[in-house]
Image (cartoon, coloured by chain):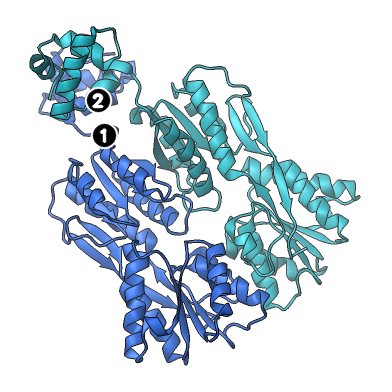
Chain colours: A cyan, B blue
């Protein structure tokens, strides 16, 4: 079914049908005749044609580092909730933790034709920024602070500082920290800095405590804890940069019959579903991932409408969840 | 930059540029001249124009019932892995467990213009089938068996039967079952039927055992277990239709100091990340979710290429994971 066929059936000009489809001005009578034909023929304007006309795709892109993780499904769920209300479709792209692939996706992104992009960033390099600069559509960065792009991020430094302070306050004298790759600005660098800040307040320094880097997995947490236990001085409290790492730590301590929290306190960060299911229940920091997805979506919607957003960079709050491991 | 502008700069006809862009036959010399212009002007063919020409969007749609769940992130990760290799983008749609919304998405799907659809189905009604019949692009159903559409599904009945048989074999005389809504054919009806089959082999009937329906959450599992414990006869083994329900059951039993597996055996289904982190580690059935995503993607790719797939309906295997709760 084409516009000219509808025009013929309705006894109007093609221009009239086109005006109808684009909400242009039209006499009541013509409008009714066109509507009748559209109803009877079940015509739906082709999206291709509409896109050609309006240059809008009603799609936004979401680039994530890994779909199957603790945070990303919650973030996606928040984004999708909001975009759905506004009739936007979400084009999902997954770099699967490959930096090369991630930059490749950003560089070729133009071809996938979206009206805007939410980039769930774990690592933000110069190359990312160059690729983003050529994007040609509004971009919102989620999960990392950026001076150049509108962003929604978590207070990683504040949260790590608060959680380590809790451990120290509750009597830990030999704390340990299991962090992640510091090229990851949020979970790596900022949380590390937060821990440093807390230690300093208590006259300690990162060099003096047991510190290990792990990947984002239960197994990596287990191994890091094994290494820490092999050292001369056993810590009396361990802060982990993620709940998954903390799950590995708990499993290692349970196998070695080291009582938590009596002999060793343990805390995670992220408040994933597992935190409440671990045994004992894990003390952790709650991040509002679903909210961050929703807020990023709102920010992008404002930018796509060329509306000045209230705030271009927004740091979300955190909440300490005190449970049974401290 | 348009095709005719490129043609002018390269000193060839527009038809030649068009043949070049569509991999048509062309003299070596013309090809090189066009390539040079494209390189120098940094021209990228507009996706809109390409779509108009080829009627292909290089996008597939994926409709899921809930993003933030145990299975869906794994399924999406499998789909995205395969589609990415084939240069397809994934348009993600989320019905958020609303049947109305799900059918609405299917009915208006045409407008989002994809070359194919993977429908991760939890419930499959007549209305779904009518909407799917009008889709106009190849459809693959994932997670439910369909007689009408190509599908990838799990052996839910076999898995539930095998898991309940394990409980009975290991000495349970008073088993209980916590299932989910039986309108959900896979997790609800099929698993229920599997349990019935196992019971019958041991001369038991579903009416004689404690049976409850729960939603897919830890809390619902907790409440169902509370209700079962309030009954006169206490069971000595509980099979749960999902690991999340089992997590709630374990938490309820732990609070009441009912020893697992000594006083009561517990088993889940799904083998989510939580199964290995629960305390004690949960005996469960492993479903190959990531694989199911990949297989559904392969099936859809075959259908989109109009290639007859090897198999139109494929049932995936399961694996019993014996851990500490049985």
Q: Is residue B314 left or right of residue B243?
A: left
Q: Which residue lies at the image location 64% right of the left edge and 60% below the top edge? A: A275
Question: What chain letter is assigned to the residue under label 1?
Answer: B
Specify whether residue B156 is in view: no
Q: Position of residue B105 (x, y in %)?
A: 32, 40
Position of B226 with respect to A13 (left or right) is right
Q: A163 or B15: nearer the eye?
A: A163
Residue A109 visible here: yes
Pointer 1 local density, CA inside 10 Å: few below 14, some 14–19, many at least 20: many
Location of residue B34 (image quadrant): top left
Q: Horizontal placement of B154 versus B302: left or right?
A: right
Q: Which residue is under mark 1?
A: B113
Does residue A257 appear left or right of residue B214 in this picture? Answer: right
User: Relative to residue B217, is residue B280 depicted above or below?
Assistant: below
Residue B160 placement (x, y as % from top left): 37, 76
Give the class, few, some or many, for how many residues have Cα within 10 Å of label 2's Cα (few <14, many ≥20): many
Question: Which is nearer the eye, A65 or A13?
Answer: A13
Q: CA distance from mark 2 to mark 1?
A: 8 Å
Asked which secondary structure carries label 1, the reply is loop
Q: Chain of mark 2?
A: A
Q: Which residue is mark 2?
A: A48
The reply to whether dot 2 and dot 1 touch (C-beta < 8 Å) is yes
Query: Residue B285, image x and y in percent?
Result: 42, 73
Pinpoint residue B201: horizontal percent, then vertical percent. Answer: 32, 89
**Which disc is residue B127 wearing?**
none
Which residue appears at 36% of the width and 85% of the height? B205
């Amino acid at each position: 079914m084409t516009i000219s066929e509808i025009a013929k059936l309705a006894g109007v000009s093609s221009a009239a049908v086109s005006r109808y489809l684009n909400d242009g001005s039209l006499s009541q009578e013509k409008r009714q005749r066109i509507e009748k034909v559209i109803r009877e023929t079940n015509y739906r304007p082709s999206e291709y044609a509409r896109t050609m006309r309006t240059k809008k795709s009603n799609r936004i892109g979401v680039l994530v580092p890994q779909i199957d993780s603790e945070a990303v499904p919650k973030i996606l769920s928040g984004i999708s909730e909001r975009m759905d209300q506004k009739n936007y479709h979400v084009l999902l792209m997954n770099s699967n933790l490959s930096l090369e692939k991630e930059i490749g996706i950003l560089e070729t992104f133009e071809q996938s034709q979206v009206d805007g992009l939410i980039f769930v960033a774990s690592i933000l390099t110069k190359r990312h920024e160059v690729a983003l600069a050529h994007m040609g559509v509004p971009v919102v960065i989620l999960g990392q602070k950026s001076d150049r792009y509108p962003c929604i991020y978590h207070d990683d430094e504040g949260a790590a500082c608060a959680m380590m302070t809790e451990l120290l306050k509750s009597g830990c004298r030999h704390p340990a920290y299991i962090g992640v790759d510091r090229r990851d600005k949020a979970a790596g660098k900022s949380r590390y800095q937060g821990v440093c800040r807390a230690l300093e307040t208590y006259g300690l320094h990162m060099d003096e405590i047991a510190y290990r880097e792990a990947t984002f997995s239960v197994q990596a947490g287990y191994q890091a804890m094994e290494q820490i236990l092999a050292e001369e001085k056993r810590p009396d409290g361990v802060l982990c940069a993620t709940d998954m790492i903390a799950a590995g730590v708990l499993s290692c301590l349970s196998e070695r019959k080291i009582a938590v929290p009596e002999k060793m306190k343990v805390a995670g960060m992220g408040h994933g579903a597992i935190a409440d299911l671990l045994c004992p229940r894990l003390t952790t920091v709650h991040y509002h991932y679903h909210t961050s997805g929703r807020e990023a979506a709102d920010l992008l919607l404002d930018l796509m409408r060329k509306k000045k957003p209230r705030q271009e960079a927004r740091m979300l709050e955190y909440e300490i969840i005190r449970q049974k491991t401290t």
